[in-house]
Amino acid sequence: MLHKTRGIVLHYIRYGDSSVIVKIYTEQLGLQSYIVNGVRSAKSKSSKIALYQPLTLLDLVVYYEPEKQKLFRISEVRCAVPYQTIPFDIRKTTVALFLAEVLTKTLKEESANLALYQFIEQSFLHFDQVQGHFEDFHYHFLLQLAVFLGFAPSSAGELASQLREAGRWRVPAQHEEAVQAWLENTLQMNNPTPLSPAWRGELLDALIDFYGLHIEGMQQLKSLEVLREVGK
């Protein structure tokens, strides 16, 4: 049966000589995997693989019969909204690849969640459009995503307490007050000030460690090293 849906590409893996298996978080069907043939062929006259780069926004017509199989095929596909800055700004590109990897590890539901889909899509459309002062985007995104995933802390103190209990609170004493103040303002939607270079890396470690309490594999983020290097 064919279904129309929007989708956000999370990642793909190579399959055979010219095909890929791509994971897409869809508006109507939740997380789905699709096999796409011929997109890596040297004889292909179009760069179809470009459609399956992480976080690409797609309009899709897909086959969906979950009672018969788990790996489906795409009947029609086109880019829904081409990004104007993310692919061309190395700072934005590294943030996008980092968050795509986070989403790959955290999104598991094979059912629709319209609010979550809209949050992700609108977040990246905003990120693409903003011209400056976007260095803290991924910090805000991680805290908001945790709300949809069901484990957001109610306060900065709760986040720090959970990490301390797990032996993962690594923020030095001299930065602890500033880090917790920023977290509290953000959680309470109080328009926090920009992150300080002195402790932004420590805060990112804390957020990843916090995710790691709830999601397996968060300590093996391959994109994190690149993000830190570009963000220096």
Image (cartoon, helix red, strand yellow):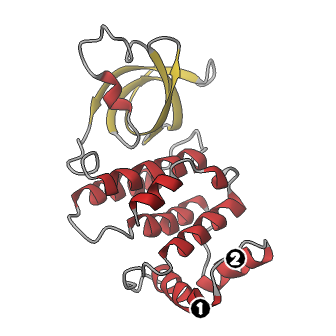
Q: Amino acid at mark 2?
A: Trp
Q: Between 144 and 201, which is closer to the camera in this rendering?
A: 201
Task: State which mark lies toward you, 2 or 1.
Answer: 1
- Circle 2: element type: loop
Q: Position of residue 167 (x, y in %)?
A: 78, 73
Question: For the residue carrying disc 1, how many other residues have a C-alpha within 10 Å: few (<14), some (14-19), or many (20+)?
Answer: few
As drawn, the label of residue 216 is none
What is the three-letter code of the residue carrying label 1?
Answer: Gln
Q: Are marks 2 and 1 in contact (CB under 8 Å)?
A: no
Asked where in the image residue 149 lies, by quadrant, the reply is bottom right
Residue 65 makes an appearance in the image: no
Q: Position of residue 183 (x, y in %)?
A: 52, 81
Cα gap from disc 2 to disc 1, whole angstroms: 13 Å
- Could you tell whether 16 is left or right of 191 in the image? right
Q: In the image, what residue occupies the spot 42% across and 24% down?
A: 62
Secondary element at image label 1: helix
Q: Which residue is mark 2?
A: 169
- In the picture, the disc for residue 174 is 1
Q: Quadrant of the C terminus?
A: bottom left
